[in-house]
Amino acid sequence: MTALRRWIGSEWLATRVQIALGLLFIAAALPKLADPPSFAHMIYNYRLLPGGFVNLPALVLPWLELLCGVALVLGIWNRTAAALIGFLLLVFVAAISVNLARGNAIDCGCFDVRDAGKSVAERLHDMRMTVLRDAGMLVLVAQILFATKYHGPPSTEHGV
Amino acid sequence: MNLRRHLLETATLLLVAVAVALVSNSIASRERKLKLPGDYPNATTVPPTQAVGVSSAPAQAASPESSPATAQQSPPGSPGTSSKVNETAVTAPAKPRGAAAQPVDLPPLRKTPVSSSPAAPPPSGTATAPAGDLLSLFPPHPDRPFVEISGDAAARLHAAGVPFLDARRTSAYEDGHVAGARPVSVWESDVDEKVMALLGEQDGKKPLVLYCSGGDCEDSHLLAQKLWGAGFNNNLVYKDGYPDWVRRGGAVRTGAKP
């Protein structure tokens, strides 16, 4: 194993990545928890789900993000939480990409559920940046999965 | 072994998330609550009408011929797109359901004297019409859920005392709204009750001005669809909405009261 591979798979790095990713998801969940109708509005704007199927994800998704984020920060069920976050990120990337392809400019509702009042061009630019950001977070997820696989079952505390 | 453990952990996280979400929603305040069964934004769902005496016939029962061309109603100089009829919005709403809704307390409709000086010149071709003859200026349009109007027309209607409905979220309403407008957020769980309350006090043929945040905001259009299905057939959507109203220097208020 090369030094780079060993460093990428190290618990030291994985711990910091877990905390960073966990905090990001906690930060993303809080505005949605504070205002579920606005988040439902955001989901509705994606034009991917029929109106009748918007409410349940609008209520559950923020709690799932919060639980996964807390699990990562506390070092509990790291691998499962990271895998769930990875799945969510893939869904987000797909949803935003579909709307980019449609030319449907929307606020992503990732970290803020208020109407930002941006122009169409600004929204489309933000959507592209969001896809890139989510891809970056997928790299973090991959690091966690790689490191936890390399080191076997995840520990319940951060080995710093 | 590992797979089974991960599946169990995943199921646990999902179940806990669903349980906590349902519990938190059940104890959430009116503005934060979401209705689980039923449509969202709950705008195209028509509220029940049996408990309230509705003065007007169902909007969708009327023939298209009964609606005049609304492009003639807008004043000169208004934006080209803001006064035209949105043909794509003409969709049949759901039938009213049978159950009754709970009445809620709403602030009274604003009754600005009709003799108030209009903030905009009268519409083209109607300059000689009396200011109070709003039904001739803005006749009912039972064949379509709404007609879009310009800022000039909205200012004129506001000056004439026509009720304004704010379709944005209550928090946005409290940050600032058209003076006299009532909050009827199409995204909040009590929109049915507010529409029902409106049914009890407003003739469905009289004009109602609906607005939201302008731009690509659809809230006022969604609310218009709901009102149309409930029997209101003179819904005028102020397409450019609150930002345009502020830009024009229209009267605004902050807080929870109209």
Image: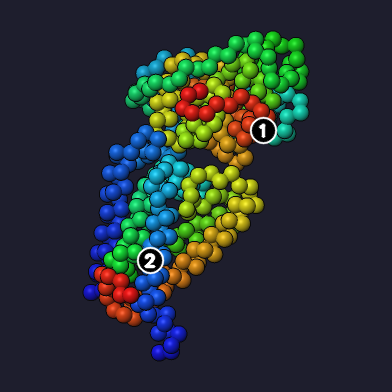
Is residue A122 rendered to the left or right of residue B32?
A: right
Residue under the image location 28 percent in, 66 percent down: A76
Q: Give the camera-side residue of A26 and B114.
A: A26
Q: Give the camera-side residue of B127 and A65.
A: A65
Q: Residue furthest front?
A: A160
For residue B175, above or below residue B106 = below
For residue B68, above or below residue B37 = above
Disc 2, SS:
helix
Is residue B49 rendered to the left or right of residue B64?
A: left
Residue under the image location 35 percent in, 41 percent down: B36
Is residue B134 rendered to the left or right of residue A86?
A: right
User: Marks 2 and 1: CB-CB under 8 Å?
Assistant: no
Disc 1, SS:
helix
Amino acid under label 2?
Ile
Is residue A58 rendered to the left or right of residue B166?
A: left
**Whole-percent x and y of residue B67?**
63, 21
Chain ID, mark 1: B
**Whole-percent x and y of residue B223?**
51, 31
Please give the label number shown on residue B236: none
**Whole-percent x and y of residue A19?**
38, 66
Residue A47 seen by the camera: no
Residue hosting label 1: B247
The quarter of the picture where the N terminus of chain B appears is: bottom left
Residue A9 seen by the camera: yes
Residue hosting label 2: A19
**Whole-percent x and y of residue A43?**
47, 48
